Image (cartoon, helix red, strand yellow):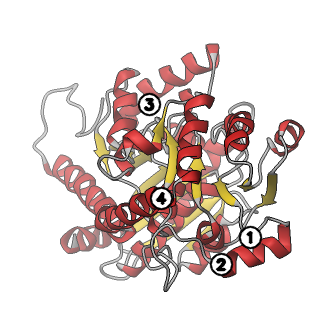
Amino acid sequence: MPKLLAECTERRGSEPQGRLTVLHLAQPVTGGVARVVTDLARAQVGAGLRVVVACPPGGALAHLAADSGAQVVSWPAVREPGVHVPAEVYGVRRLVRSLRPDLVHAHSAKAGLAARLALRGRVPTVHQPHAWSFEAARGRTALLARAWERYAARWADRVLCVSEAERGTGEAAGIAARWAVVRNGIDLDRFAPPAGLAPGEPDASARARLTASYGVPATAALVVCVGRLCEQKGQDILLAAWPRIVARVPHARLVLVGDGPDLARLRRVAPPHVVFAGAAADVREWYAAADVVALPSRWEGMALTPLEAMACGRPVVVTDVDGSRELLPPGQETTCLVPCHDTVALADAVTRLARDQRLRAELAEAAVKHVRAGFDVRETAAAVRETYAAVLRERAAARTAPFRATGTRRAGAR
């Protein structure tokens, strides 16, 4: 990597020696994508890279990225495809001309669309789907999204997946990409069991604060769901399962932590014993107070919430979507993994954990060890930098390769 950094500096001639410029492009400014971008930016700044984060104004990402030491620039973009795309593509071209990055890292669907249309392989490009766009779509829109991903793979030096399952979903959709898989990681200094408590044991002081703020009984069997209130995260599935849980665990309470477009709809269908806590600047207190953390997602790449909860010493219940089997400790699939959309299986799994304190403690202890052994964000960031290094080596080799017959494509083209 040091040699590559020097080569990039010599080629550009404008940055201080040893500085590689990486442009992170992201449309989501909250949630898991924002956390991943922020964690990568912080680690890359610490490793001596020049890091620029381009994102829409507003939301948490711009502030978090700036605090990490990255340069932050505005890239106005909206979630949905449509009439805004030409302006978003032009915005990427303008940023690349101004910033002259050595590599562009496009996060999620909209950035992946705009960056690949704007650059078309002229600048080393890594696309990270953060779950596939066609999983969120239906009908003709889903068909078009699959067709786009198959076509646009030629303009990415790497398609970076956060789980082997996410890569498998892409391959099953017919995407012939140059794949890399780097599992999500979390900050293990920040997410850890509360001091002085055994794994699985709720924090009494956190419970007391919840009782004062939200009226949650201190003795309740507390189930917490952290995530954006939207179709992807499946809170409606958990609400549909909740009456079955309360029928068997009458003192159970459910707290939905987060905000999003489905808030009003979820409030309308919520049964009793459900608290809408809104977005939280720091979710650790919710993990500390919980008996069980549930995330009934409809699709993922690899969700961060279960990793954070397990690192904090909490058992989780998750649906069997991409990344879930890879994030759970070996053997916990039988207890903590349920089929997607299956309200009965979800209710049964949550009920079992809510009733059995010994089981919660056993699962939580194994979960802490598992996450600490394999999901450190520093290792994730190092693996992403190695992916960059491999891309830049290939590009350098392609520039110095002898000219061959007309029709020869650059390395990485499709």
Residue 1 found in image quarter:
bottom left
State the image coordinates of residue 305 (x, y, percent, origin top left). 54, 56
Q: Which residue carries the number 2 mark?
A: 204
Q: Which residue carries the number 1 mark?
A: 218
Q: Left or right? Give the position of 11 relative to 252.
A: left
Instruction: Decide: few, some or many residues near mark 2? Use Cα within 10 Å; few <14, some 14-19, many ≥20.
Output: some
Q: CA distance from mark 4 to mark 1?
A: 18 Å
Instruction: Decide: few, some or many residues near mark 1? Use Cα within 10 Å; few <14, some 14-19, many ≥20.
Output: some
Q: CA distance from mark 4 to mark 3?
A: 45 Å
Q: Nearer the viewer, mark 3 or mark 2?
A: 2
Q: Which residue carries the number 3 mark?
A: 152
Q: Which residue carries the number 4 mark?
A: 360
Comes first in the chain, label 3 or label 1 = 3
Q: Amino acid at mark 2?
A: Ala
Comes first in the chain, label 3 or label 2 = 3
Q: Amino acid at mark 4?
A: Arg
Residue at 30% in and 62% down: 374
Comparing 169 with 315, the one in front is: 315
Quadrant where the image shows the C terminus: top left
